[in-house]
Amino acid sequence: MTQKLSAKFKLWISTENREGVFGDGKWRLLNAIEDKGSLKGAAEYLGISYRKAWGDLKKAEAGLGIKFIEKTRGGRYGGKSVLTADGKNWIKAYSNFRLDIKKKVEKSLDIFLKKISNENNN
Amino acid sequence: MTQKLSAKFKLWISTENREGVFGDGKWRLLNAIEDKGSLKGAAEYLGISYRKAWGDLKKAEAGLGIKFIEKTRGGRYGGKSVLTADGKNWIKAYSNFRLDIKKKVEKSLDIFLKKISNENNN
DNA sequence: CTCGGTTATGCATAGTTCGACATATCGCTT
DNA sequence: AAGCGATATGTCGAACTATGCATAACCGAG
């Protein structure tokens, strides 16, 4: 076993009733919406289908009872999507959360690798 | 949004060539094998099919090039499976790794929850 | 030398998730 | 009034995963 090992993780938030109402994917989606100004643009940017992006957003909002996005339909440019205050709040808080864990995973991985490379550990 | 929120996570190890050669599922499997003394017993205990347990173990061993389990076929009791030194080593190291992350997730979740409950954060 | 219980492995099936389509609706601009 | 581009939502099919089934090999004990 001489290959390079890496650690990956997934993180998500659940309510009592529903699993995974928020997580990395939905966090990325909100970020992309903020950036692109539309759900469609965000989906294209992320390389996922509009159908999925829309469904994910709906699941998050329905599951949590929070409105993340103010969506407008029609008009010269067809419509748009902008984050609500809650949306911005969640993005920010989740970014920190995720980064915390990411750092910890990296740090703990080092320790893990040391342990498994020592045959003579206790 | 007055429901109780929780955070979940998944953790796994990858090589350059293969994703997920070790993770929570395989860690639980090794634990169960150690406990039950057989792959079959472990699968039943974990509520997964023998087919999957066997396949998972094979993926882990093949992906990492490590032998975790010494398997014996035949005999009065049909056969048995016992952990190798590497197997025990990995279980232990991964347990610590996982626990580290689990604690961190709990701690960071508290901070996260405080942030999203304060509308007046910066 | 047969029996029992386990490992070993292929295959066909069921279940889940996601993407591709297909429409429908909406409302500002021209 | 017509067009454009985004939101809204159902549906069918594809890809992946897990399960169930079938079968074979194995070997100590009676």
Image (cartoon, coloured by chain):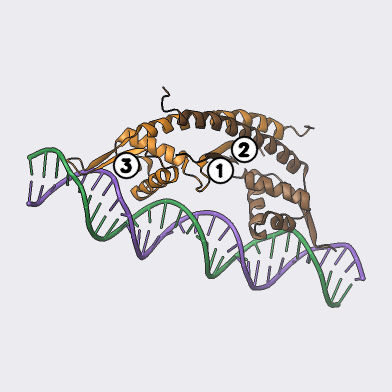
Chain colours: A brown, B orange, C purple, D green
Check disc 3 and give the amino acid type.
Leu
Eye-nearest disc, 1 or 3: 3
Which subunit holds the residue at mark 3?
A: B
Whether marks 3 and 2 lie on the same chain: yes
Specify few, some or many for label 3: CA neighbours under 10 Å numbering under 14, 14-19, or 20 or more: many
Q: Amino acid at mark 2?
A: Gln
Q: Measuring 68% from the left and 54% from the top, which residue is drawn there?
A: A46
At horizontal 18% and vertical 42% (from top left) the residue drawn is B75
For the residues labelled 1 and 2, say whether their Cβ atoms are less than 8 Å apart.
yes
Residue C23 x, y percent position in the rendering: 68, 72
Of residue B117 and residue B61, the one placed in the foreground of this image is B61
> Which residue is painted at 77% across and 49% down in the image?
A35
Quadrant in which the C terminus of chain B appears: top right
Query: Same chain, marks 1 and 2?
Result: no
C28 up-or-down from B27: above or below: below
Residue behind mark 2: B3
The chain under label 2 reads: B
Q: CA distance from mark 3 to mark 2?
A: 40 Å
> Callout 1 environment at 10 Å: few (<14), some (14 to 19), or many (20+)?
few
On screen, A16 above or below A44? above
Question: In this figure, which residue is indicated by the disc labeled 1?
Answer: A17
3 and 2 marks in contact (CB < 8 Å): no
Residue D20 location, quadrant: bottom left
Circle 2 SS class? loop
Q: Quadrant of the N terminus of chain B?
A: top right
Residue C7, compared with residue C12, is above or below; it is: above
Which residue is disc 3 drawn over? B39
One can see residue A73 in this view:
no
Query: What residue is shown at x 40% (from left), y 43% (from top)?
Result: B61
